[in-house]
Image (spheres, grey):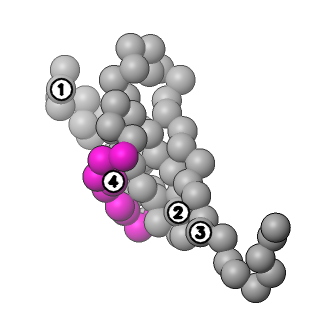
Amino acid sequence: MRSFGARQAEQPVWRKASFCGNGECVEVAELNGIVVMRDSKDPHGHMLRYTTEEWRSFARGIKAGEFDDVGG
C-alpha cells in the first residue's frame, strides 16, 4: 500500500565511465544537488561529496590535462 504524504528518500543513480573494464572503478551520481562519488568495489562504503561547482572545476581540470601526471 502506498503512503500518501510520506516522501520517499531519493536514491542516487550511479554511473561509471565506459573506460572501466576491470571493475576497479569509481561511480558518480547526483543526490539532492550534490555530486557523490564512491568506490564501485565497496558500494556501501563511504561517499565523497562535492558541490556542483567543485565537480565542474575538477572535470575542467581533467579535460585540460592538469592531472595527467597523477597515477600514470
**Disc 1 secondary structure class:** loop
Q: Categorize mark 2 by other alpha carbons within 10 Å: few (<14), some (14-19), many (20+).
A: some
Give me the C-alpha separation between circle 4 and circle 1: 21 Å
Q: Which residue is mark 4?
A: 47
Relative to residue 39, is residue 3 drawn left or right? right
Q: Position of residue 34 (x, y in %)?
A: 47, 66
In the displayed structure, does residue 62 sit left or right of residue 68?
Answer: right
As measured in the structure, the alpha-carbon distance from the residue carrying label 2 to the one carrying label 3 is: 10 Å
On residue 71, which mark appears? 1
Q: Tell me the CA gap for discs 1 and 3.
A: 37 Å
**Residue 56, position in %: x, y?**
44, 56
On screen, residue 42 versus residue 7, left or right, reads left
Is any part of residue 39 visible from this angle? yes
Say left or right for 47 vs 31: left
What's the amino acid at mark 1?
A: Gly
Q: CA distance from mark 1 to mark 2?
A: 28 Å
The answer, for residue 62, to whether it is visible in the render is no
Quarter of the figure with residue 72: top left
Per the rendering, the mark at residue 9 is 3
In the image, what residue type sits under mark 2? Leu
Whether label 1 touches label 3, CB < 8 Å: no
Mark 4 and 2 residues: CB-CB less than 8 Å, in contact? no
- The Cα atoms of the two marked residues, 4 and 2, are separated by 11 Å
Of the residues tagged 4 and 1, which is closer to the observer?
A: 4
Q: Are marks 1 and 2 in contact (CB under 8 Å)?
A: no
Residue at position x 59%, y 48% from top? 13
Of the image marks 1 and 2, the number of the one nearer the N terminus: 2
Q: Which structural element holds mark 4?
A: loop
Binning the other alpha carbons within 10 Å of mark 1 as few (below 14), some (14 to 19) or many (20 upward) gives: few
The residue depicted at 59 percent of the width and 69 percent of the height is 9
Residue on which the image places disc 2: 31
Q: Earlier in the sequence, mark 4 or mark 1?
A: 4
